[in-house]
Structures are given as C-alpha cells and as structure tokens.
Image (cartoon, rainbow, N blue to C red):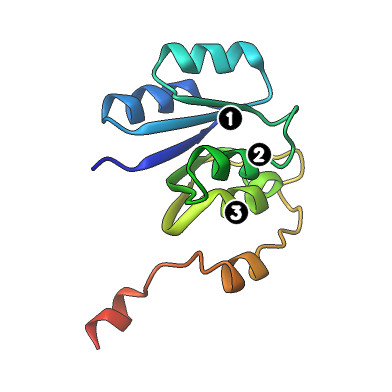
Amino acid sequence: MCPDFVVRDRTEHVKLAAAAGAKVVATSSSDEKLEEARKFGATHLINYSKHPDWADEVLRVTDGKGVDIVLDVVGAQSMEQTVKATSFKGIIYVIGVLSKDPDLPVKIISDILYGAKTRECAAYRLM
C-alpha cells in the first residue's frame, strides 16, 4: 500500500508522489498552483490562505489519521501544522526553508508528546 502524502507548495513533488501511487494532498496559497497540482495527480487540494489551520483539512480528508509522509519546503512557519497533519509514526521531510522568518520559534513539543507523533528509535528496537 502506498502512503498518503502532503506536498507543500511544489508541484514537481506532486508528480513524483502521484506517479508512485500515493494519495496526494497538495497545499498552496495559490488556487492556480493547486489546479496545476490536480493536473499532476493531487487528490485533495488545500489553500492555506483560506484554511490557516490546514492540518484540520488534512485530518478531515484522511478520516482523522493524518498523512504518512510530508514534504515541507516552508519550514518554521508551517511546522506546527505539519506535525498536526502527520500520522502516528509518520515522516516529515523538511526540504527547504521558505519561511519569511526561518528563526521563528516553533511550538510543537505538546503535539509530539501528547499527540504521539513520534517514531520508535532504531536503537531502542535493537534492545
């Protein structure tokens, strides 16, 4: 089974994920970019200018599960929403830092600790 993806702001990543058979949730502040993402295979489109709490939309379209993999090019500015949108044992790849303020403090500890959004430590599995 192919994982669910959230792709943040880059349609070329939509192409790759959709070609691999993933259900792709694309986010952008531009409806035009979202329509382009649909053409490349995105199954769900979220305009984060219209839905600032876009993670809630991701959870809605994934029946509360969240997505398995997030490709995030924004960084600090979107990290809280990114963590909330990610499934239990999901993976977040931060592959860019397009935030207006890359030094913006990120408040994700409670989401990680109380939202159980962490993966097992490989060293722990070896014990």
Q: Name the residue under label 2.
A: 54
The answer to whether the residue labelled 3 contacts the one labelled 2, judged by CB atoms less than 8 Å apart, is no
**Residue 50 drawn above or below residue 109:** above
Dot placed on the residue nearer the N-terminal end, 3 or 2:
2
* Residue at 42% from the left image edge and 28% from the top image edge: 13
Q: In which quadrant of the rendered image does the N terminus lie?
A: top left
Q: Mark 3 points at which residue?
A: 84
CA gap between label 3 and label 2 equals 9 Å
Q: What residue type is labelled 1?
A: Thr
**Residue 73 drawn above or below residue 15:** below
Q: How many labels does the image show?
A: 3
Residue 64, given in percent of the width and then of the height, sits at: 52, 50
Q: In which quadrant of the rendered image does the C terminus lie?
A: bottom left
Q: Residue furthest front?
A: 63
Q: Mark 1 points at which residue?
A: 27
Dot placed on the residue nearer the N-terminal end, 3 or 1:
1
The answer to whether the residue labelled 1 contacts the one labelled 2, judged by CB atoms less than 8 Å apart, is yes
